[in-house]
Image (tube, rainbow, N blue to C red):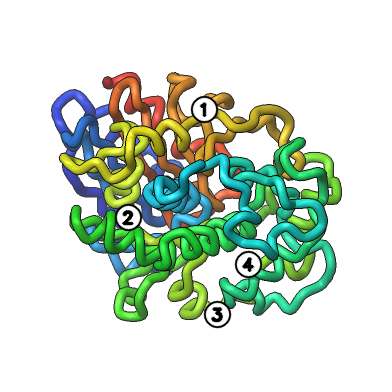
Amino acid sequence: MTKIPISGYTSPGFEPVRAAFESNFSKAEELGAAFYAECNGVVLFDLIGGWTDRSRQQPWTGNTLAPVYSTTKGIAALVLASVISKLPNGYETPVSELWPAFAAHGKEHLSIAELASHQAGLPGFPEPIDPELWLAPDQCADALASLAPLWPPGTAHGYHPQSWGYLIGKLVKIIDGRSLGTVLREDFTAIADIDFHIGTAASEHARITDIMRPRQLADLGEINEPTRVAFLTKWAASNRNADTWRTIEIPSANGHGHAKSTARLYSLFANQGRLDDRQIITPEAYDGLIKRRTIGPDLVLPYETDFAAGIMRNNLGFFGPNPETFGHAGWGGSMALADPDERISAAYVMNQQSNKLIGDPRSKRLIDALYKCY
């Protein structure tokens, strides 16, 4: 049997986390993966293991990038928070005040906060589109803005798996003048040497791991119209050209990084908008970012979900024992969390996907081990 390459730093007292990480491989549940956590800027562990390719020839390294899918949303929410102070009314600003075309079909009163918390009623396109539209972010955002909502905006919430990022990306560009990925690069990652990308340059593609997709579909519960539109039409996602999909900016879905870089960015949730010694997000904007915006039955996902302005709150307990923790999961199993009480941030990335929408057993074992050690 080929020996599984597992390496990385583990601070004293966190050996059970490494054991849990190794156990996921011994159960044959991983091809390649990484898990990282820090507390108040101090690294607790930085673990990597396995391979980046199906033939198990290329070991996962500290330089390997992985697509984190919807875990990207938490990072995009941070970028929105960093520019929201340019608006006198911040998150309460109606979207249509900035983007008049968005007012179509009764959406004129929807606030930025409500849009960011999945209350717009725009989880996808009900009628057929050319799936290539998803590869043209500006045009896709405009097409979404022209739609009639599937429920009265602001009266309920339903997860917007793809469309959220196009709408938020358009808003950031209207507010700031730069694209969301550019703000991330110039105001976050460049100043702290963080290797995370929304819109990944072609020069970095060779570092991106292969992905093994799940063999079974996710359990979406009872299928209703919003769920169908979000996930189950033939045009619910692009016919992916991998290079194009990686290179464009999709703030809901195509962030690329490693566990360390993802957790480093999520540390802003744990540290009141600060990254190391820099206040990236103003205290007022941070309060607006983390404020509960909606909680209850999700019209798209088979859960009761709890959303702030683009980040999930921990009502389901998938992000550790603290209900005040923030987090997000991505398609196939990636996950990041931030605990503002303990000032912990952590992230898990991998390339062998499961069919769990949230609460992947692999990440749950790792999170449980982390908190038992802390």
Q: Residue at x 60, y 31 (%)?
A: 306
Mark 4, other Cα within 10 Å: few <14 / some 14–19 / many ≥20 = many
Question: Which callout, 4 or 2, points at the residue further toward the start of the chain?
Answer: 4
| Image: 183 above or below 361 | below
What SS does tag 1 mark? loop
Q: Residue at x 53, y 40 (%)?
A: 309
Give the image location of residue 348, x and y in percent: 38, 45
Residue pushed farthest front? 88
Q: Mark 2 and mark 3 in contact (Cβ < 8 Å)?
A: no
Is residue 278 visible in the rendered image? The answer is yes
- Kindly identify the amino acid type of the residue bearing the numbered disc 4: Ala
- Kindly identify the amino acid type of the residue bearing the numbered disc 1: Asn
Tell me: 330 left or right of 192: right
Distance Cα–Cα, label 3 vs label 2: 22 Å
Mark 1, other Cα within 10 Å: few <14 / some 14–19 / many ≥20 = many
> Can you identify the residue that label 3 sits on?
241
- Kindly identify the amino acid type of the residue bearing the numbered disc 3: Asn
| Tag in front: 4 or 2 | 4
Question: Which callout, 3 or 4, points at the residue further toward the start of the chain?
Answer: 4
> Can you identify the residue that label 1 sits on?
314
Distance Cα–Cα, label 2 vs label 1: 23 Å
> Can you identify the residue that label 2 sits on?
258
Q: Mark 3 and mark 1 in contact (Cβ < 8 Å)?
A: no
Q: Residue at x 33, y 76 (%)?
A: 206
| Tag in front: 2 or 1 | 1
